[in-house]
Image: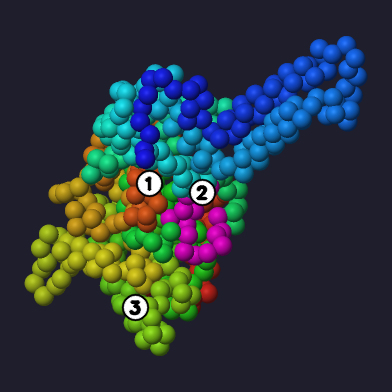
Amino acid sequence: MRRVYRREVAPLAYTNPSVNLIALGGLVLMVAGVCALARCGLSADADVPILGVVVQGMGQTAAVALAVGVAALIAAAVVHRLQSDSAKIRHKVRRALCHPSFGNPLHLQDGELLPHVNCREIRDGVYELTVTAGSCTVETIADAASAISSSLNKRYQQYAVTQVVTDTACNHVVFCLDDVTTDRSITASTVEALRQDTPTQLVIEHGTYIDLTRSGSMIVAGKTRSGKTTGVIALLIQVLLSGPDRYGSCVLVVDPKQAELSRLPHVISLDSDGEATTILAALRRFAATVVARQKVLNALSEQAGDAVHWWDADMHPCILFLDEFVALRDIYPAKPTKDSDYCRATFDALLKRIMTTGASAGCYVIISIAEASVGEGGLPNLIKNAASTKILFRPTVNEGAFLWDSRKLEALKNDRVYQQGDAWYTSEDGDHEQITCVHFPRMTFQVYRELGRLLREYYDENHAAPAQ
């Protein structure tokens, strides 16, 4: 039976079991002391209790009380030691929400059902707190975010609510609790510092990865000097460090601006006449790579009698990075000339096909746009919807509205000042579907020189460079 709210409850109601055990142990030891005084101190003939003699002088009641008190204190220490941080946070929050001495933040009346509180660690140092509605509404629970943050004292005082997500069925509210003082960012002084143990995970910061086995293509947005290009390069470096596979893997970097990236080896840029036929040909080759790799996986699956994923076949990820996507797309004419398919529709169709079918073969697109906007002159909706991972550097709510729906933005506690390299991040991988604040790796080495070296080594090892 679920408990109900009462204005008159014991002072220690809803506390952590270890606290109750400490209180019990202290009380019982006090009883033992009183019994000892009654047995020894009030008798003129009583011997002075010293060490082992004290038990004999205290009497049976005092000895039992002493044993129970000591056992309770030991049990409290054991429970506190073995109890997870999630359980400790749960008890703190539940007491803050349910005990009248904390001001009744849920505005409950006598006899109303108390909410159910659950807490789990979703990644290192980040907790998901779920409060299931009892007699109160989810709106009232969501408004208790400040009370929840205030309840996290002592060793958890640096934690605060950073997201509030209300269930669409109005059954519960999910709070994200994060240590707001912890810097999880990575500073890489050498390119090797970014090497990962597995090619399927791309690190963003300590404890946060893009898991390519569960996510798809990416949209990366951010204005000039937001850290967008550097952030993408950090991801490309990790892919290049894993090296090519034996199934024709590739890393294609497309720079239509003919800027810094275009000076690197194996980077694809505009034709000498300013057209983008070479880039369109690169998209066709990448699409063909998706088909070829999928055929290999289908054959392996038939042999195994079960589905074989690209990472099970020891494939490494293929990446197509399109820098300055909006500028690139505008290069293509709206309509093709006679006997030609060189137009925007061909570009869009190829890209959509790659983004919707590529992930199963380990092929991903990273689209970079200078400003988050959708529609004519910006990012087509069909491309935006095909991307399962979205990243916005040095974010603002207005820009975020082009990438995420209002519910996700409203859930985010947006009271931070964002610096270069800071970003909002989501991925449809089951762990990062709500907007997370992250900081992409700081790279103190010569980034473009190392990227060029890795591209050269990648294709030297692969014995196949992308056609220019």
Looking at the picture, how far across and down is residue 211, in whole percent? 43, 59
At a point 37% along the width and 40% down the height, the residue shown is 1
Amino acid bearing label 1: Tyr
Cα distance between the residues tagged 2 and 1: 13 Å
- Given residues 256 and 194, the one toward you in this image is 194
Q: Quadrant of residue 145?
A: top left
Q: Is residue 191 above or below residue 435?
A: below
Horizontal side, residue 259 vs residue 182: left or right? left
Residue 207's tag is 2
Quickly name the residue at label 3: 294
Range shown magenta:
194-210
Amino acid bearing label 3: Gln
Earlier in the chain: of badge 1 and badge 3, it is: 3
User: Which residue is the extreme one toward the bottom?
Assistant: 303
Cα distance between the residues tagged 1 and 3: 29 Å
Horizontal side, residue 178 vs residue 346: left or right? right
Residue 425's tag is 1
Q: Is residue 77 above or below residue 269?
A: above
Looking at the picture, how far across and down is residue 26, in whole percent? 66, 25
User: In this figure, what is the number of numbered marks?
Assistant: 3
Q: Is residue 398 above or below residue 242?
A: above
- Given residues 23 and 303, the one toward you in this image is 23
